[in-house]
Image: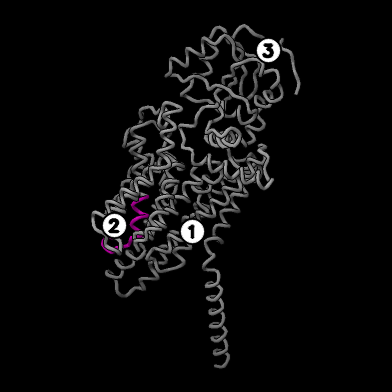
Amino acid sequence: MLSGQITNTNFEALMLKIMSIWRFISPYKASLVAIIGLIILLAYYHHSGIGISPDSVQYLSTARNLLETGRFDNFHHQPLIDFPIGYPLALAEWEKLGLWLHLNRLSLHAELQMTALLNLILFAWLMVVADVLLRKFRMHPIELRLGLLTIWATSPCLLEIYSYAWSETLFLPLMLSMMVYLLRYLDNGSMIDFFIAALLAACAWVTRYAGVALVGLSGIYILFTPTKQRYSWVRRGLHGWIWGIIGLSLVGVNLYRNHITGGFVTGMREKSLSSFVENLRQAGEVLAGWWPVFTSGIGLPLVLSTLLVSLLLGIAYMRKKNLAELVMLSFGVGYLLFMVIIASITRFQTLDSRLLSPAYIPLMAGLAGSYERVYAFMKKISLRLPIRRVVSTIFILIWIAFQVNNGIMNAENYDGIKDAGIPGYTEDGWTQSPTMLYLCKHLARCVQITPWYSDADDAIYWFTRKQAVLLPHRENPCERQQFQDAPQAIIFWFNDAADDDLISQRQIEQLPDVHIWKRFDDGIIYLKGNIHIDSVSNHTF
């Protein structure tokens, strides 16, 4: 008996100790969870650094030109129009900080290291602000919030974003931070929170053009979601008008500058080739990749089911005034539908995880917010079962499924990354490209012949800091005629960069004044015109 009392006393003391430790680390758990993702990212960066895609070259070259010339020009020395200026501006300010601290001299290696460090900071910011949003939910179990954070910290969707120099790395934390202050405003009517949220929305919009969905949906919340101050319709309308003005301010200047300097507001946009239903199916396939209980091939039924469930949950949230859950869920669904509609109007790449990533956390959080609704429903239909334990078990099984799926996908990704690097221009396939290595070695000879044409003009700039012209598009007769009329040129063809929108290798070789100069395993260098580069003097560096 005494032994049993001692055992119980020890057990209670142990539990009290565990609870005290839990209370101590509770404010820091988002940071601790973020460390998991940071470790994975560092493992990805280990082989060759951060991933660099063609879009990354646009961003980084614009940031470099901004520091050197004060102009938002890309590596073609043309105004950056296809992308907004927010992310290159942030990169430039970050590199300026490195210069001020004497950590960065604008070398390629230092540039990669600074960008990778920035990504780690932004990822940690994303996890912390996601935790702040979850605290506003009416989900009682702390473990449920921690479960969501661990899913996001190991999510292949988010880890892919933060493996590259992409504008989404900045857009996502800006978006969630804006939601935090917007919810504070809707909760207490504070105008300070209102203006902070509006400025964050403006920064998000000038970081990605798709931020228009963020500003628009938030304006709807301001107009139709009553605050505790119970503002009149006139005052809500005034707040909505101010919100729109502030939200549009930065991107408005950006768009005006685009029109003045480049003649286009957001660049040349071609008509979409895919229907609304097809884009909806593509969005469903992305969802199937995010959620482990589904497989590919069911994109359309999955996305329609998600929309239906979200609608029902949204109605329940409105009735119970679960404001945080409603805002998160409606933004996730709204952004998803916005991208599907836009992709049906103007030509996009196939809707993928990167393009839809801003919907990832809000949509999942909004659906997970149904925990209390599921618990209440099951309590009504059964009085004998330990309902809370049953519901918790269901969510634990779902969490395990997500983590298993995340672990499998991350292991597969790392298996390729550890040997060759992150896919892109820092991958071994490019850094060890025989065609590119030959160009870099004989750069002094090649620069004596202009212009340069290539199907990977951004890659040539990245490795040589020299400018090449993109090969003409198939459907652009002016570009094709200008290319054919060029009296001389060097054409660098890279097999890995082949693009169906550009003229093909066969079309290049059919031109009468084009002949092969050097052939490599991964590409070909052509000479156009009556010139033989071997006769050009071979200057050395």
Does 322 appear in magenta? yes
- SS of the residue at dot 3? helix
What range of the chain is rendered magenta? Answer: 316-331
Q: Nearer the viewer, mark 3 or mark 1?
A: 3
Mark sitting earlier along the chain (3/1): 1
Q: CA distance from mark 2 to mark 3?
A: 69 Å
Q: Residue 533, labelled with which disc? A: 3
Coordinates of residue 456 in the picture (x, y in percent): 56, 26
Other residues around mark 3 within 10 Å, as few (<14) / some (14–19) / many (≥20): some
Disc 3 marks a residue whose amino acid type is Ile
Disc 1 marks a residue whose amino acid type is Leu
Other residues around mark 2 within 10 Å, as few (<14) / some (14–19) / many (≥20): some
- SS of the residue at dot 1? helix
Q: Nearer the viewer, residue 305 or 70?
A: 70
Q: Residue at x 75, y 18 (%)?
A: 539
Q: CA distance from mark 1 to mark 2?
A: 28 Å
Mark sitting earlier along the chain (1/2): 1
Coordinates of residue 503 in the picture (x, y in percent): 49, 19
Disc 2 marks a residue whose amino acid type is Thr
Mark sitting earlier along the chain (2/3): 2
Q: Residue 225, labelled with which disc? A: 2
Coordinates of residue 326 in the picture (x, y in percent): 33, 57
Viewport quadrant of the N terminus: bottom right
On the picture, is 245 further left or further right than 15?
Answer: left
Q: Is residue 44 visible?
A: no
Coordinates of residue 90 in the picture (x, y in percent): 54, 43
Other residues around mark 1 within 10 Å, as few (<14) / some (14–19) / many (≥20): many
Q: Nearer the viewer, mark 2 or mark 3?
A: 2
